[in-house]
Image: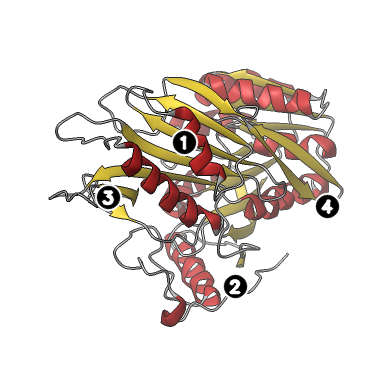
Amino acid sequence: MSATSSSPTERSVLCRHFGACGGCSLQDRPYAEQLTHKKGKVQAALSGIGDLPPLSILGSPQAFNYRNKMEFSFGDVYPPSPTRWLKLGMKPKGRWYEILDLEECRLPSPEAAQLLAAVRLWAEREKITPYNSHKKEGILRHLVLREAKNRAERMVVLVTTTGDIPRQSFIEAVLSVYPATTILLGCNAKLSDTAVSDELEILTGPGYIAETLRFHGGSVDYRISPHSFFQTNSLGTQVLYGLLRDWTREAKARTVLDLYCGGGGIALSLAGAVEKVVGVESNKSAVQDAAANAELNGLKNCDFYGGTVEFLLPALLDMKPEVAIVDPPRAGLHASAVKALLDSTPPVLFYVSCNPEALARDLKVLSERYRVERLVAVDLFPHTEHVETVAWLSSK
């Protein structure tokens, strides 16, 4: 697997919002240069650790239109005018109280920009007010898109404070420009400005979408509901999970622990390569998603447990897994989890990290019992500063 080239990123083809929008801070650099920059960031974070293998980096198969989830926000125009009083777009970096009215976005599918324009016109025509976080009044809060990349399925969720909108005209506005296979209406009356809905009403379709991730020697189907966790770059995730699947086969693992498993993405991708995989996740709805997706794929060798890793890990390590995979939150491994791993020392540990600094800290502690055999960075977020890093650790 190797990085694939992207479309040119010279200034003449940059998104018109580049610089004002905080979402794509590296878009003015050619993609190959972005990969070099990210590789350098990881190397710098790990520079204090001795005896490390060379670091390689794998690029995203698609550098534009790669995101399968976007959350756009509504806002009001001040001062308002008879013809323009509503915005729909992104919140500029560091300015949560403002909305950048987007005319285009290179991260989701190209049709997303048309959808933003159509929903904006619909709201103005129907005279539906945007939510004002200062005044704590208004109706429209967020527009959420979820898009399969290997299947022709797309979801639109309109999040409001009351749910009181003309439903049929909204459906017509969406379908006039965007091939949504399901449309939902969500209600969030809380003061917290999030795109998570307390109540959901299905307006069209089944209320979820399905995505398929393909790997060498297999594939996995995932059912994605409005609040399901799923890596935001489907094609890049195939690269990441495919790498872990190849490593697991190479390690000749029979039993694998997937710690911080989320909705079971990694666990399900490995199920066809091992005898048993056990996932652990503290988010109860994510555990339910993981179990449902295992059933969807007819996988009988997957078990998922709800609870914190630091609490459950000592008992799970009694299973003597050949491989343990950790994909912790940005802060890194909990100290109790590190202690349990050092006490039991599974033969092989795969560490997946979205934070090179936290990875460096944990590798230093784990070096008491482990040595790092391989290091690979995987870019799931082109045009941003973020990058994933995967380390293969073997017990000494």
At 87% from the left and 48% from the top, the residue drawn is 217
| CA distance separating discs 3 and 2 | 29 Å
Label 3 residue SS: loop
Q: Is residue 357 above or below residue 175?
A: below
Q: Nearer the viewer, residue 7 or 75?
A: 75
Q: What residue does disc 1 label?
A: 170
Q: Mark 2 or mark 1: which is in front?
A: 1
Residue 173, how many percent across, how many down? 49, 42
Q: Mark 3 or mark 2: which is in front?
A: 3
Q: Nearer the viewer, residue 338 or 387?
A: 387
Q: Mark 3 or mark 4: which is in front?
A: 3
Circle 4 packing at 10 Å, graded few (<14), some (14-19), many (20+), is few
The reply to whether discs 3 and 4 touch (Cβ–Cβ < 8 Å) is no
Whether residue 368 appears in this view of the structure is no
Residue 143, how many percent across, how many down? 42, 40
Label 4 residue SS: loop
Q: What residue does disc 3 label?
A: 99
| CA distance separating discs 3 and 4 | 43 Å
| CA distance separating discs 1 and 4 | 41 Å
What amino acid is found at the position of numbered circle 2 in the picture? Answer: Ser
Circle 3 packing at 10 Å, graded few (<14), some (14-19), many (20+), is many
Q: Mark 1 or mark 4: which is in front?
A: 1
Q: Is residue 207 above or below residue 22?
A: above
Say whether disc 3 or disc 2 marks the residue closer to the N-terminus.
2
Q: What residue does disc 4 label?
A: 216
Q: What residue does disc 2 label?
A: 6
Whether residue 384 appears in this view of the structure is yes
Q: Quadrant of residue 379?
A: bottom right
What amino acid is found at the position of numbered circle 4 in the picture? Answer: His
Q: Is residue 80 above or below residue 63?
A: above
